[in-house]
Structures are given as C-alpha cells and as structure tokens.
Image: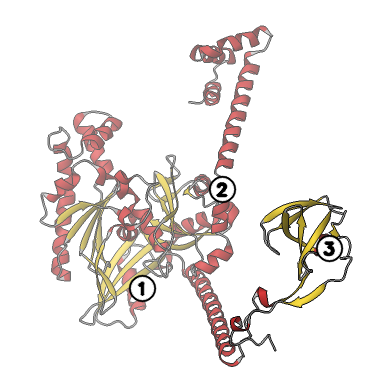
Amino acid sequence: MLIEETIKKARQRKASDDLILEKIMESNPERRQAFQEALKRKATATQILDEIVKQNKKNKDAEETTKIKAEGWKVQLAKVRQTHFLRDLLDVTHHPIVGIDISDHSIEVMQLSRAGRIIAYGRSVLETGIVENGNILEQKKLIDVLTNVLKTTKPFPLIADEIGEIKAIVSLPEAKTFIQYFTFDGKDKITPKLEKMIAQTVPLPIKDLYWDYLKIENNDGSVRAICVAVKQDVIDSYVYFLRAAGITPVALDVESASVARGLIQTNTQNKKEKVVLSEDTMILDIGAKSTTITVYDSLGVMCFAVSIPCAGFLFTEKIAQELNISMQEAETLKVSQGFNSDTKIFSILEKEAMLIVDEMKRASSFYEKDFKKKVKKIVLAGGSALLPEIDKFFQKFFETKVEIGNPLSKIKEVESLDRSRGVLYSNVIGLALRGISDNPVKNGINLLPTEVKTKEMKTQQGKRKSVLVASAVVALSGIALLGLSIFYLIYLPVPPPMQPLKYRMMTTFPVGSQETIQISESFQEIDVYETPGSDKIAFTVKGGETVTILQKVDSWYKIKVEENEGWISEQYLQEEVQEEVQEEVIVPEEEDIPQENNFIE
C-alpha cells in the first residue's frame, strides 16, 4: 500500500499523528533519521505527515506526466485515426463502434478494425454494488469507470472526451430477457401475431416492454420467429447510462447471441445460395449465477435457449458447505482442482453439474425431435469453462465433441489478450464483431427503442449515400480524364523531340582568347558547378575575384580559375564581357544528323 494511503486510512481510524509517524519510522528505517531531524527542528508530526503526502502526490503526478508524454504519440495517432474525415472516407457506418460488456464484476470494451484486428481493448474490475444482477445501481460510478477504461485502452486509447462521439453495442444479461419461440404457417403479418403471443406468454403488460424478433423462413413455407422482450425501465437505464457517458447506443444485444457470435466457427460456404454454414452447435455458458444452454443451427441462427440457476457461485457454495470452509477457501479449491476426479471436491461438483448434464440432454433431444437435426458440437463458455478438466467431465456423457470455446480465432493480433483465458473474451469479441458487420443496427436482435434504432439507421443510410455520391464523382472524374487523355493522344500532333545539347545555339569564345569577367562583390563565396544547373560543386570563388570565361550556354558561364573549370550563373557576375564574342552554331557532321530534324532548315 502506498504511504499516503496508509496515512489516510490511519487518520480515518482516528489514530493520532504521533502514533502514525512512529509506525512509519518503524516500517521505513532508512527514513527514520530524516524524520527525527525534522522533529528536532520543532516540526510537528502532523506537519511531517502532511509533507509526506504532499511529496508523494508530486512524485505521482510527475510519473503520470512522464507516462502521458511517453504515450503521447499513441494519443495523437488515435486522434488522427478517428478524425471525422478518415472515418467518413473509410467507414460508412461511422466508426468507432465499440463493444461494451458490462457484468456485475467487471466492464470490458473492444473495438476491431474491418480486418478483425484489435484497435482498442480495455477492462476494469467493478466495485461491489455498482451493478447487481444486471441492474445499474450506481450510474455515476459506472460512468467514471467506463470513461477511464476508454482513455486507457490498448494498443491505442479511444479517448472519448477528446475525439467526441463514440458509438457502442452493449449486451443484456440473459436474466433480464424473456426469450420466446413461435412458429407460424405463413410469413404475412408476423408482427401483430407476435405482439398478441407476447401479451399471452410474458408475465408483464406488453406496454411495459421493449421487444424485437428474428424471422427464419423454413423450407415448408412456415416461419419460425425468435422473440426477445425486456422491461422498458431496464432498457431506459442502459440508454441513459450510455448517453450520460457521451456514448451513442447502436444496439442492445442479447448476451447469448453475442457470445455465440464470438464462438461459433464457420466451416463451409454454400456458393449457390451464398450463405455461410457451420455445425449445429450447443453453447454451454456457465456463468457466475446461472447456466445458459443455447442451440444454433447450421446457419448460425439461434433455435432456442434455456437457463438454469446452477453455475459457478453454486459450485463454490456447495464446496464451502460440504467441507465446512470459507467461501474464499472453497473458491480457491474449485479454481485449482476443478473436475479432477482424484480430488475431494470432485463428488461435490459432480452432483451439481449433473443438473446441467440432464438439461443438456433434454435440449439435445428437443432439438432432434422438433427441428429434425442433431447437435454436432458442444462448446463451453463462461468463467467456469476454465475449471481444470471440465471439458473431459462433460465429454463422458455425450458422443458429440465437447470443447472449450476459443473466440480469439475470430480476430487478429491478440497479443494484448491473455490466450490462456481466451474463452472469457467471448462476449466482448462477439459485440465488437457485430460492430464491424455491414449493418450493426439490424444484424441481430436489437432491443433499443424504435425511435433510437430509426435515427441510427437514417444516419447510416445518409453516410452510405454520401459515400456513393463521392465514389460516383471520383469515377466520373476518372472517366473524363481518361477520355481527354485518349483525345490528346489520337488527335493532337506530337511535338518534335527536344534538341540535343550539341544542336543548341550557344556562345563560344575564340580559342586562345583570355576574356575575363569579375564576380559580384555582393557575395562572399559562390559555388561553381561541374555542369550547368547541376548540384555537384566543382570549386568555389570569392566575391570580387576576376575569372577567365571559356563558354556561355543560356544564362550560364563556363569559367576557369587557375587549373579549375566549372559553370556559374550570370546572376553572380558584376560586369559584361569586355570584348564582343562570336556566335556560332555547333552543327554535327551531315551523316550524324537524324532523319527527322525539324529544327534545322
């Protein structure tokens, strides 16, 4: 613990400053002499403690400043990367869209690039009581935590307060949702039928609910609808929280759906129908207080889900009761030993886990009977999926392959994440993947109020139109330039080639003449070049010096100083050549003249 925190807590416990100082000297013998000298100078214990706190604060601020400067280039790069110009040019959905996973114990954020690389990732542990059972109890504290996470994401900070608007997709815990499944003979007028069915099956007035659904058309012409409903005050609290944090909500997803998005692996693609296929998959998400069993078909569509109150917390509680130990000790045993059959906690875990096994078997049978399909893979998710040998335990009861989920295979450049705990990122990765989809608002269940969804859809459509118009202008401009280029190539005459230097008109001086010229005195030292206009310096001359002229080409004079020869511009010369020079044209021998030579008459 930092020394200033020790002082603060000791003072809160009403300890005297003299006692606090004495304890500090005991634990810091290297500073005892300095403290004793201060006391001899009549400084009080209170003054010394206040000075310690002050100095430590200065050191902490200095370290923070150094860190900010060291990370400054990343912040600047993040600002450039997220400017409106680049976002509008490169992304029609107005990124950044950040996935935010809020649980009772932590908050995680992740943003991906279009290629699936991590642009930003951050996580923070929440104090007990900020969020409970999915309810946001302390809005202000949660906003502070989220803002800090956004500022400290890696490898680049999202810096929400400096960039401006950030958009987000957030998941709702399964316990807050009512998930219903309905089948209709035809696909017409589904919405009013669903509204009627919800009113009959959900134990709340429909006027107090927000709801959304996914429609799946079966081969026999019937329609299967997956409908999710949530109390309005739950949704309103999430929307209020996000807006208060300066974040625009794009979608409120269902946790089981976002987890599946991060875990279900696609294997093949039906090129004829242009759909991506996967294996019929059961996801077993063993959380802290409940376990959710969700089955997905080969199209990756949720078929049904069931939740039971048997999960990690219950495992710990039963171990503590049976062994008569504390919850902390029971948690340590559970995490270290897990489902190892040679341990004393195995029989306890086995008894509770069998409740989950029985429910999995019922779900598998229901899928086979009602959907005429078989589950071909079981994927474990949630915090308890990390318990040792849990996959082997469940494998004993199923012929279907059981494996621990690996959402890291869905994204690139995962160096900033703990690979050994990859399954824990399933939800936040699933949310971030929706953020880079073609239509984040409509690609899945979205429990936002209708007016919020409509506004975001209009924003996206407006951006798409702007990008299309800009693309059309660029394309038309390119076509016009191409047409002009072709016109010039076909119809305009080709200009004669530039004359070689030996055919140009130049001024020479008679051989043996010693014409001189004086360098301007306005310059102290002037460079003389090997050839006219080159950057290779042959030698230098001083202002006022008289030099011998050998030749003139355009505005350049070839001069000689002792044994050195080179070229100098006429702007550095002070007076004209004293004697008239002779002009002549250097003409090559007749046989050396090119066939097409329209500069010689």
Is residue 442 visible in the rendered image? The answer is: yes
The answer to whether the residue labelled 3 contacts the one labelled 2, judged by CB atoms less than 8 Å apart, is no
Of the numbered discs in the image, which one, if any, rests on residue 73?
Answer: 2
Residue ID at (59%, 83%): 591
Camera-near label (1 vs 3) is 3
The answer to whether marks 1 and 3 mark residues whose Cβ atoms lie closer than 8 Å is no
Residue type, numbered disc 3: Glu
Identity, as a three-letter code, of the amino acid under mark 2: Trp
Residue 402 versus residue 303: which sits nearer the camera? Answer: 402
Measuring from the top left, give residue 410's x and y in whole percent.
32, 58
Which numbered marker is on residue 124? none
Q: Which of the marked residues, 1 or 2, is nearer the chain's N terminus?
A: 2
Q: Where's residue 385, x and y in %?
A: 25, 46
Looking at the image, can residue 354 be seen? no
Q: Do tag 1 and tag 2 residues touch (Cβ < 8 Å)?
A: no
Residue that carries the numbered disc 1 in the rendered image: 195
Q: Using the numbered discs, state the Cα–Cα distance from disc 3 to disc 2 in whole angstroms.
A: 62 Å
Q: Tag 3 or tag 1, which sits nearer the N-term?
A: 1
Q: Which mark is residue 515?
A: 3
Considering depth in this image, is 138 or 491 the residue closer to the camera? 491
State the separation of the CA atoms marked 1 and 3. Answer: 106 Å
Look at 58% across and 57% down and name the residue there.
164
Q: Is residue 88 above or below residue 328?
A: below
- Which residue is at the far top? 40
- Front disc: 3 or 2: 3
- Where residue 64 appears, x then y in whole percent? 57, 36
